[in-house]
Image (cartoon, rainbow, N blue to C red):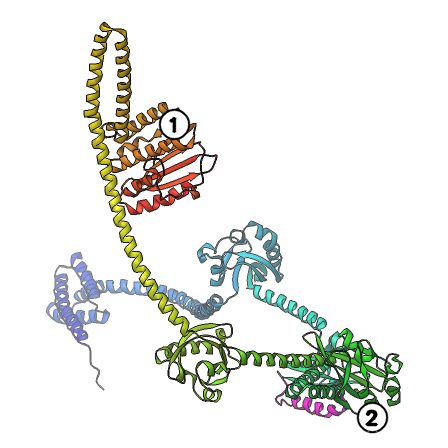
Amino acid sequence: MMTRWPWWCAILEYAMNESTSELSDDYAAALRSYLSTDGEEALHAAYELGRKAVAAGLGVLGMAKIHQQASVALLPQLGKNQHHVQAVENFFMEALSPFEAQHRGFHEANARLRVLNEALEKRAAELAATNRELSHEITRRKASEEMWKRYESIVNTSREFLTLIASNYRYEAANDAYCQAHCKPREEIIGFTVEDIWGRATFRNIIKAHLDQCFKGEEVHYQAWLDMAGPGRRYFDVSYYPYHQRSAVTHAIVVTRDVTDRLRAERALRDSEEQFRTVMQSAIDAIILTDSRGTIITCNQAARTMFGRPREEMVGHPVNVLVPERYRQSQASGIKRVRGADPVRLIGRTVELPGLRRDGSEFPLELSLASWQTERGHFYCGIIRDITERKRAEEEIRLLQTVALSVSGAEDLHAALGAVVSKVCDAAGWTIGQAWVPRPDGSCLECSPAWHCRVKGVRNFRKQSEKSTFVPGTGLPGRAWETKRPVWSADVTQETNSSRANAARKAGFMSGMSMPILAADEVVAVVEFFGRETRSPDPRMIKLVMAVANQIGIGIQRKRIQEQFDRFFNISVDMLCVAGFDGYFKRVNPAWKKILGYKTEELLVKPYFDLVHPEDRAHAVAEFERFKDASTAASTVVSYEVRTRGTDGVYRWIQWTATSAPNEQVIYASGRDTTGRKRAEEALRKSEEHFRELFNEAKAMQDKLRELSSKVLHAQEEERRRISRELHDEVGQALTAISVNLQLLKQKAAKVGQGLDAAVSETQNLLEQTMYNVHRFSYELRPAMLDDLGLVIALRWYVRAFAKRTGIKLNFRADSAVEQLEGEPKTVIYRVVQEGLTNVFKYANARRAEVIIRKTNNGFRLTVKDDGNGFEPDQLEMSSKDKSGLGLMGMQERLRLVNGHFALKSTPGKGTTIQALIPSEPGNQNGRAIENRRFRLCKK
């Protein structure tokens, strides 16, 4: 197969051929020059040509070929003498000298290369060994890195705290759980000391001693309560494992487990076990634990007491020793089924079984069985309860129920007593039982036909009893009748006050008991029982017979109550009924026929809602639905009124009062005919409407009268103002003129004679008094000062004049805000003060008085108070006029004009107080209401 050279090899070969051709020409030229000159420069040129040949990559053979070509070309021309040949050789040798130097260099280099090659081979061997070691190391490192990754994955996902602590107590590794527990990033733990992380006290007191022991080469395990930032105070199980490097312990591997929950669980388990032991030993029920083979493991004191066996006769023995012989075979089969993993039907259930005591006596017990399984097998716990008393109680309850049924179904008292003595004899084992009832006059007890006997040979005793009677306190029946308590006799033949002692002895009776039967604390019968064996007083027996007697008494009392109810039911004038939840009457009384005309049989087959007026039916149905709610109906009494149709088709109003008995599914109701009352109410309503109209008319008339009174007062005030003005302006001026004339006349009379002078002086004095009175009347009618100078100045002037005229000490105080009043309110206050002080002067016989006007939140309060005689306000007719001018009524009317309020308080011997309230704004009704409430408080 022909080898194909690369293109660059061809180019290189071409370049070398071209260089060889040039070198051959140069060589031939240089050789010719040397042969012609034989100089050193020509030899030097030969040397340069040799170097050029070396540089061109020619070898010695190539150079020899060029030399041969040049020699062949030149020697024939020069001749082949020895000199030329030698010169050619010298030239050739000079040209080869670079090759020789190169060859020597090659030899030296080759020698060095051999040495170097040997060194390289040695180094290569070393490197190969190192490379193999590095390869193994890389493999180990990769395995280590993989193992480290797995380690980190395991360590950081572990819930345990894993750390690596150096011998200088500094952390070098810590897993995520440890960092999270301390609430710190890893960089704040790695490089820090244990003391930095846990604190000085914890490190010194707990951790350091254990770490030092680990650094000595020992594994350390301890448990302690430690505080961490994350979980808080927890209980930890800490393990220190020493880590060796070159036979020295350099680190401690720390594994910390949070065992707080386990500690609490262990404590709870210990407490639970202790509680179980305590409960088991203190339980009143018997508790027995057995294994799957039926062997008793342990039992409590109650179990040992119940079965009458000591501990050594129970623990380690089969459980079947506690059951009668006839049940042991079935118990062994049950244990075998349990060991064969057969489901146990008794687990979780309560069953009744007979138990066997150590003395051989049997008793009824109640067994509750539980089981659990461990690696050691199945175990069972039996809780056993002695139900002897409960069985007796159940028998007694059955007896009482039987007696109750017998009594309720008995036709009369004697039949009920017969059922009682029969049941008691059978239950208590008495030989004979009989009953005694009081005569209607209550003088003695006589024998009842009711009796029961379980044996023969007592006929004579029965005949003797039928002939006998007992007064209170004689014989067993008489003593029970008198004391109303049971009487027990251990030997009836020794009864000295009994006429039947001999008959009892002949019948073989020994013990006896009598029991009174009470109904509402009244003895209605006495039952007695006899037996042929001696019996000491048995409290249980007495209690049982007493319960039976009480049952009879309750039955008798219930019948009496039923009879009373029937009597009341039938004589009631109201309609009484018992209605069922099914919509039909169960019972009605005769009043239905009297009121509505229905017969009893008609009502019992007719739905009672059919009798209700259609307009009232929805209301009646709603009340009926309320009765069906058992949660509230039993304690609810409902009263409602509906119209009910009678046989004549007329609807009558019936007032129903009803309550329900949800357990009996009935409603007890009483209905009263209120049709007449409804008519009276309608008449009353019409009458009320008529009186309301009259009242409204009277009120309108009163408003008109009040309006008229207001106009009269206004007219009166205007007339007073006019008269006052005329008295002041006209009469006053005329009197003044007369006074002046009299003065002139007096002067002239002085000249005439003394008698005329005296007459003129007397006339002048009378005129001055008349002028004073005219001015006073004018002021009292309407003081001009009130309009000109204001209320306070006018009142102060009036009070001062009043005190001077009457001699009464007066205290006047008024707020400056009073001057804000204008118009009518100002006049009202002035007139009330005027009338009040006039009454004080005329009727109070007072020494002191005071007038006070105060500003309040919504008006002005006026108080006129004196220390006079006082009076009884209740005896004063406020609506009538008294002798004091306008009087109290005038004050009230004036205040009413400005929407004011008037109050009077007086006590005989303690003076009188008048208060008036005038609102700031007469039209402000809200303000008046608020101030009026405060005013009423002030009056008190």
User: Based on the displayed image, in which of its 4 quarters is residue 522 positioned?
Assistant: bottom right
Q: In the image, residue 781 lies at what x, y percent?
A: 26, 31
Disc 1 residue type? Asn
Q: Residue furthest bottom?
A: 456
Give the Cα separation between the discs numbered 2 and 1: 116 Å
**Is residue 395 within the magenta segment?**
no
Q: Secondary structure at mark 2?
A: helix
Name the residue carrying label 2: 459
Can you identify the residue that label 1 sits on?
A: 811
Q: Quadrant of the C terminus?
A: top left
- Local secondary structure at mark 1: strand
Specify few, some or many for label 2: CA neighbours under 10 Å numbering under 14, 14-19, or 20 or more: few
Q: Is residue 382 visible?
A: no
Q: Amino acid at mark 2?
A: Arg
Predominant secondary structure, magenta span: helix
Classify residue 438 as left or right of residue 922: right
Residue 202 place in picture, x, y as percent: 57, 53
| 669 left or right of 519 in image | left
Give the mark nearest the N terminus, 2 or 1. Answer: 2
